[in-house]
Amino acid sequence: MTTSPSHQAADSSIVLTPLQRLTRFAQDMGTLTDRAVIAERILIELCDATDSQQGALYLLDREHDQYDCVMTVGSQNTSTAIASFASTHTLIQSLVHEHSMLLATENPPIKPELTDVLRTTHSSQAVALLNKGRLIAFALLAPGLGRPLDHADGRDFLLALAQSGANALDSILMNDDLHQSQTLMRRTDRLRSLETIAGGFAHEIRNPLTSIKTFIQLAPERKDDAEFIYDFSRIVLDDVHRIERLIQEILDYARYMEPKLTDEDLNEIVTSCLYFIEVKADSKRIKIEKELAPGLPRVMLDRQQIKQVLLNLLLNAIDAMGDGGGQLKVRTHRLVKPGAAAWTQIEIEDNGPGISKANLEHIFDPFFTTKHTSGEHAGTGLGLTIVHQIIQEHRGEIQVESTEGVGTTFSVNLPALPID
Ligand SMILES: Nc1ncnc2c1ncn2[C@@H]1O[C@H](COP(=O)(O)OP(=O)(O)O)[C@@H](O)[C@H]1O
Ligand SMILES: [Mg+2]
């Protein structure tokens, strides 16, 4: 990213004392959060402090153990002559171990290799941004036009700026690290549960496979027994359906997809899911009541995945209420949580038979199902496992409350976008 030092012009009309400048800079470092904006602010301040018209900022890339040029000011062809420095480079070693600031005009003279680097990058000084002895970033700056910086006060000022900038960049790097490891953990979680699922799958299909095999073995000698063939072929068909369903759900689950987050209106998603289940609910004499909060904050979510979650929960509720009719309540509202963040909540409440305490502990486990009836409608026990995984990947929460004989309420909480 390149910017022009003309940014300085706006500020230069107000003459601030070094202390005022340092304070203002430190305040900015404390409040800015965007990496590029911080990098630009640091570089412009360092250029300004050294009266330099051109400069480049190199930031640590821990993964590749190098420093990449992330920002330049002034004309493009200056410091970008080198796009990145390996951490073993003489310049880096020197900035870490010997000089937190390097001047081409240093006395005693700096090493010839360092002079070469400065010459290649058309710069005359390097300023290290160190935090706790670690080089977070450094700036290469073109020769200053006015103030020489080799006097003690100028140096101290520059080093104070560099320290403040280093703190800000270090916390950005830490944040990136945290984000990366969270993503990695979620992926590992999924792989681990996939392992459980694969094991469970083998177990789950053993029974239907046995019955299919038995049928095939017996069929030749019983081929004239119409009743046997009729009854057994229905059982076998159910078993085949069951295997197909299991395979489909496992494929859905295994296809790892990073949620594609878009800015969405939850009420609209809930409404479109209810539309899908209306006919089924009607046929079972289930009344749907919806209470959607107006002015709900918007949420960043993967539309398809959240629909999958809601449909799973709604269909479970319908299954639970059986054919005797019932009432399904769907509510959305803003969730008040301690802290500043806004959350939204969707509640799906049924007045079915409820879930026993013993079962409640297992409902999110892969293959846990109480729907053992044979036929196309038997459960796979993967619905809630998938629901749980998706909500986790949205950094949300899912809770369930159930009383036997009264009903069950599932609550899905999702972090919302701030309302502006
Ligand atoms: N609303 C509900 N009311 C009662 N029991 C429920 C409800 N939702 C889920 N369950 C229980 O949790 C089990 C697991 O659900 P799920 O993972 O969706 O698998 P499946 O629907 O295939 O059985 C169900 O078999 C059922 O026993
Ligand atoms: Mg289900």
Image: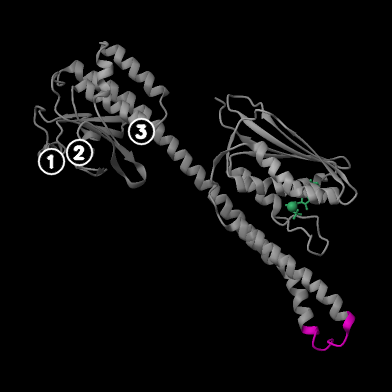
Label annotation for residue 36: 3
- Secondary structure at numbered mark 1: helix
SS at circle 3: helix
Determine if residue 278 is in view.
Answer: yes
Q: Answer yes or no: do the residues labelled 2 and 1 have beta carbons within 8 Å?
A: yes
Which residue is rendered at x = 81% and y = 57% of the image? 371
- x 62%, y 36%: residue: 265
Q: Spatial distance from mark 2 to mark 1, Cα to Cα? A: 8 Å
Asked whether 55 or 161 is in front, the reply is 55
- Look at the image and say whether residue 222 sits in the magenta stretch: yes
> Is residue 193 placed above or below 419 in the rendered structure?
below
- Name the residue that disc number 1 marks: 113
Reading the image, the residue beneath label 2 is 91
The range drawn in magenta is 217-227
Q: Nearer the viewer, mark 2 or mark 3?
A: 3
Q: Quadrant of the N terminus?
A: top left
Chief secondary structure of the magenta portion: loop
> Is residue 382 covered in magenta?
no
Q: Real-space Cα distance between discs 1 and 3?
A: 30 Å
Q: Position of residue 208 (x, y in %)?
A: 75, 70
